[in-house]
Image (cartoon, grey):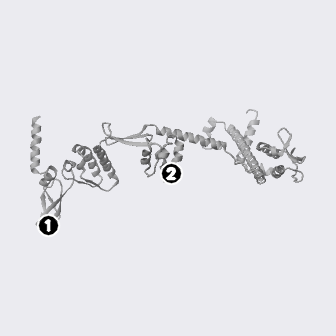
Amino acid sequence: MKLLKIEDNAGWYVNDQGDFVPIDKITKQDLLRLVGLILAEETEIDKFDAEAIKKQAHQLIYKNISEKLGDLRERRQEFTDESDRLYLEAHEKYRDTSSQQKDSPDS
Amino acid sequence: MIENVEYRAIIEKHVDVDSLKRLAVELIELLWEKKLDGKKKRFVNGLVRDIREGLRRRTSAVQLKDVGLYEVSLKERKVERFSEIVKWLQKEATISEESIQGFRILATKGSFEGAGEVKSASRIKTTFRDAFEQYEYPYEYLQRLLAKEDLSRSELYKLFTKITYKILNADGFEVSGGERSEFRLLQEIKDAQNYDMLLLDEPESSFDNMFLRSDVNRMVKEVSEIMPVVVVTHNSTVGASVGGDYLLYASKEIEGKDVVYRVYAGYPTDSSLHSVDDKTINNYLITLNTLEAGQEAYNDRRGRYEALKNRR
C-alpha cells in the first residue's frame, strides 16, 4: 500500500478513506495511523526529491515524514520487538496453561 | 496468587487459578498494546516537533506559543477554590476550646475589621490600607500582600483570618486583669516541669489568699515532689499554708555601726534557727513576726476571730 507520493509538484499522503490529500493537511491522528500501517503491513513511500516538490512547506513536511517513516519501516522489527516486553516470561507460561484449558472439551 | 504455595488450598477454594492465568495473559497483552501505543505516539510527537521547528525557521511571522487552555481553566478553578476556602475561614466560629485549671481558653476565627488589625497581625511596620481594600476578594488581596516586599511569605496565612484567644473564668465570663495574672502564674508553675528549679518571688503581691491557698499551693506542692521549690514571701498566709520543708530567714541586723545580713536556717518544727556564724533566733517569734505581723497583732487578731466565732 502506498502511503506517501509526489505528484503535480506536491507531496501527498493517504487518508483513512484511501484518498490522497496534500501533505500540509496532515494531522497527528493521520500520522499515528500511518505509523500503525508501517508496522503492520508492507508499505510504499515515494522517496523525497527536492526538485519534484515546489512549495517549500511541502518540501519540509514531506522530507521529514518520508524519511522518518522510511526509517521506521527499516527497523519495525526492533520497534515492536517482543524480547523487551514486560512480563514476557509470565505471559508464555500462563498462555500455555490457559490455552490448554480453553481447548479442553470439558472446560 | 497464581504462584503462591503457602495459601494454595485457600486460594483454590475461592478462585479458579486457571481463570487467573487467563486474566494475567489478557492483562499483559493489554499492557503491551498500551506500551506500543505510547511508543508510536512519542514517535509521532517527535516528528511533529521537528516539522514545526523546521517551518518556524522559514517564516518571519511571529509564532504563537502553545496555549494550554486546560492549564488556564485549572488555574481559574484554583483561584475560585482559594476564594471559597478563605471566605469560609473568615466566617465567625469557635475553632478550639481548652480547659486549663478552671479557666477556659477559647480560640475563635473571624474576619479582620480593618487595615489596622491586619497590620498588628503582620507585626511589620507597613500600611495595609491598599491591600485591605481587596479583603473581600481573597485572590486580589493575596496579590497585594505578595507585592509587599517586607512581608515574609510564610507569614501570609495569618493575614486572611483573625484568630482571637479569650480566657474565660469558671463562670464563663472573660477574665479580669487579676484573673489573667492568676492564669499566667498557674501556667508558669505548670511550665516549671521543664526546668530544674522553681523560684516564686512574693506570689502574694497580687493575689487574694483564697486563690493562693487553693490553686497555687496545690500546684507548688505537686511541683515540689519532683524538684526544689523556693518561695520568697513577706507577709502572707503563703509561707504557713504552703508547708515548706525547710526555712531560711533573712535578716538585716545592726551591730554597733555595721549592718550585717544574716540568713538563719532550720526546719519549720525547730524551736530555733541557726546562722552560719552560729547565731540563733527563735523560730516561733520570727514566724509570727513575718507571717502574722508580730505577737501583738496575732493575739489581737486571734481575739477578734474568736469574738466573731462566739457571736454566731
Query: Residue A106, located in which quarter of the rendered image?
Result: top right
> Is B151 situated above or below B170?
below
- Kindly identify the residue that appears in the image at 14 percent across and 62 percent down: B253
Helix, strand or loop at mark 2:
loop
How far across and how far down the image is residue B181, in percent? 29, 47
- Kindly identify the residue that appears in the image at 30 percent across and 38 percent down: B170
Considering every residue shown, the one lying at the far bottom of the view is: B257
Q: Earlier in the sequence, mark 1 or mark 2?
A: 2
Nearer to us in this view, B134 or B290: B134
Between circles 1 and 2, the one closer to the viewer is 2
Instruction: Tell me the chain of label 1.
Output: B
Q: Is residue B306 left or right of residue B112?
A: left
* Amino acid type, residue under disc 2 in the picture: Lys
Residue named by callout 2: B148
Q: Is residue B71 left or right of residue B135?
A: right
Instruction: Using the rendered image of the protein, determine whether residue B40 is visible from the camera's viewpoint.
Output: yes
> Is B211 situated above or below B193?
above
Q: Is residue A74 left or right of residue B112?
A: right
Which numbered dot is residue B258?
Answer: 1
How far across and how far down the image is residue B118, in percent? 44, 46
Q: Residues within 10 Å of mark 1 (few under 14, many from 20)?
A: few
> Is B150 situated above or below B310?
below
Instruction: Tell me how far mark 1 sits from mark 2, CA to CA.
Output: 65 Å
Look at the image and tell me in which quarter the C terminus of chain A lies: top right
How far across and how far down the image is residue B72, in percent? 63, 43
Considering every residue shown, the one lying at the far top of the view is: A106
